[in-house]
Image (spheres, rainbow, N blue to C red):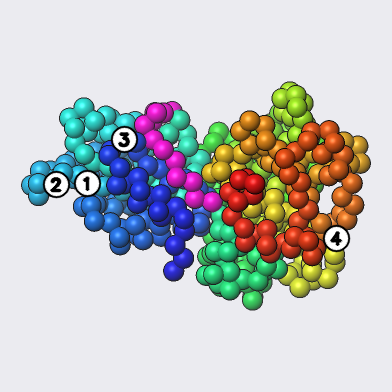
């Protein structure tokens, strides 16, 4: 069984004095519940793990009742500390206000209950945390699976990872693409849109958001203005609505829109988005013609390579504290720009059949003077080496 790096973070924070609620935040099917099981197998502190999945959404007393049971148990058994874990907490109405009340009660009465929250909807967790629990929590971000994890767990080749992406639940079906597509639709895409997005946010035009999601995934790696997207949509909308919907999809770790890098902040926010899937399985589901077929076309396969590298970078942006952009000036373009604290820049170009000309990298370097410029692909820096190297190694150069 794969042990993800976030496990050590959970262990370290639970060994610290009680200070903040720990929240495991990440998209569907990335192993948050498995991380908790692995933690409990090693934990020496008394712990109670609960799941709100089968609890009625209007049963607001459930959290308080379970919490009080833990307090009584601590008294009876003479425990100095206890870990309370609540999975799928977002399914309880007004959950964040209840958690705030119980957490503050323990803080006031010096009751050492350490709390871990997790759930299948990152958006639902995010809304509750920002509304009621601001200043009381820390995030442990759990991104999509990396190439090294998929290779270790399922013996994925680099080509398989680029096409089928990093969903561990879908991995057993890659040799039967019809079954793989069915799993993607039924277990990942439909729950993510219908439950994690449409049931969380106030979406006035759900059909419009769904169409934006499908088109954006299909055009991952492409720079397309919203007004051009509108022409392909059956549902009426405007550019500001599409921008808000894209932000929601980004918060759900499904589809992002990279901004064009510029020194002027206003120009960044007004730029045309470059669509970027968080997992290339989404590109393959909406656009792929088959794993073997796509590799036969160097130009199309180049889109998958670029999207896979973009997915790797966007998944770790918050965890590693950097911003991700693209850059384009007329016909000159750089695929990805990493901006760290202090405006430290790294320019990254993908060498593939999608676009072989790398002149934009030199022009960008002359204008903005990045600390490092890297061309990924080919013999100088193979794609597999990029995926096998931790992001923090690049950032520390």
Quadrant containing the N terminus in the rendered view:
bottom left
Q: Residue 99: percent from the left, percent from the top?
A: 31, 35
Q: Name the residue under label 4.
A: 353
| Label 1 secondary element | strand
Between tags 1 and 3, which lies in front? 3
Q: Residue 378: percent from the left, percent from the top?
A: 80, 63
Q: Which of 68 and 154 is in front in this view?
A: 154
Whether the residues at callouts 1 and 3 have beta carbons within 8 Å, the answer is no
Residue segment shown in magenta:
131-143
Using residue 202 as the reference point, say whether residue 363 is left or right of it.
right
Q: Residue at x 70, y 47 (%)?
A: 276
Could you tell me how far apart the alpha carbons at marks 3 and 2 are, in whole angstroms? 18 Å
Q: Which residue is drawn at 10% across and 43% down?
A: 75
Q: Nearer the viewer, residue 334 or 289?
A: 334
Residue 82 badge: 1
Residue 19 badge: 3
Could you tell me how far apart the alpha carbons at marks 4 and 3 are, in whole angstroms? 51 Å
Q: Nearer the viewer, residue 15 or 397?
A: 397
Using residue 247 as the reference point, say whether residue 149 is left or right of it.
left
Q: Mark 2 points at which residue?
A: 79
Whether the residues at callouts 1 and 2 have beta carbons within 8 Å, the answer is yes
Between discs 3 and 2, the one toward the N terminus: 3
Q: How packed is label 3: few (under 14 Cα within 10 Å), some, or many (20 or more)? A: some
Q: Which residue is drawn at 68% across and 64% down?
A: 384
Q: Can you say whether 257 is above or below 169 in the image?
A: above
């Amino acid at each position: 069984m794969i042990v993800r790096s976030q496990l050590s973070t959970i262990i370290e924070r639970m060994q610290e004095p009680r200070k903040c609620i720990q929240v495991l935040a990440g998209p569907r099917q990335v192993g948050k519940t498995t991380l908790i099981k692995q933690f409990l197998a090693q934990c020496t502190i008394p712990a109670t793990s609960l799941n709100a999945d089968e609890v009625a959404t209007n049963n607001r007393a459930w959290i308080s009742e379970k919490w009080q049971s833990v307090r009584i148990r601590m008294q009876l058994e003479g425990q100095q500390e206890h870990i309370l874990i609540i999975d799928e907490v977002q399914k309880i109405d007004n959950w964040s206000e209840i958690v705030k009340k119980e957490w503050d009660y323990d803080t006031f009465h010096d009751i050492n209950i350490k709390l871990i929250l997790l759930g299948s909807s990152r958006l639902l967790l995010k809304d509750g945390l920002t509304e009621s629990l601001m200043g009381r929590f820390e995030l442990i971000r759990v991104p999509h699976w990396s190439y090294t994890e998929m290779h270790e767990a399922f013996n994925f080749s680099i080509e398989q990872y680029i096409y089928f992406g990093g969903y561990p639940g879908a991995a057993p079906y890659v040799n039967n693409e019809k079954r793989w597509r069915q799993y993607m639709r039924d277990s990942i895409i439909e729950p993510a849109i219908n439950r994690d997005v449409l049931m969380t946010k106030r979406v006035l035009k759900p059909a419009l958001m769904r169409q934006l999601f499908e088109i954006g995934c299909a055009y991952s790696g492409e720079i397309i203005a919203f007004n051009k997207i509108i022409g392909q949509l059956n549902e009426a909308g405007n550019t500001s609505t599409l921008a808000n919907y894209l932000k929601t999809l980004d918060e759900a770790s499904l589809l992002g829109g990279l901004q064009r890098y510029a020194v002027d902040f206003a120009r960044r926010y007004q730029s045309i988005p470059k669509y970027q899937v968080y997992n290339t399985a989404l590109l393959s589901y909406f656009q792929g013609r088959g794993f073997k077929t796509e590799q036969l076309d160097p130009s199309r396969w180049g889109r998958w390579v670029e999207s896979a590298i973009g997915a790797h970078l966007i998944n770790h942006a918050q965890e590693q504290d950097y911003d991700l952009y693209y850059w384009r000036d007329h016909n000159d373009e750089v695929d990805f720009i990493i901006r760290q604290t202090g405006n430290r820049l790294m320019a990254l170009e993908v060498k593939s059949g999608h676009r072989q000309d790398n002149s934009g990298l030199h022009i960008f370097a002359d204008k903005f003077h990045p600390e490092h410029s890297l061309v990924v692909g080919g013999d100088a820096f193979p794609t597999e080496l990029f995926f096998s190297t931790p992001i923090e190694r690049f950032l520390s150069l």
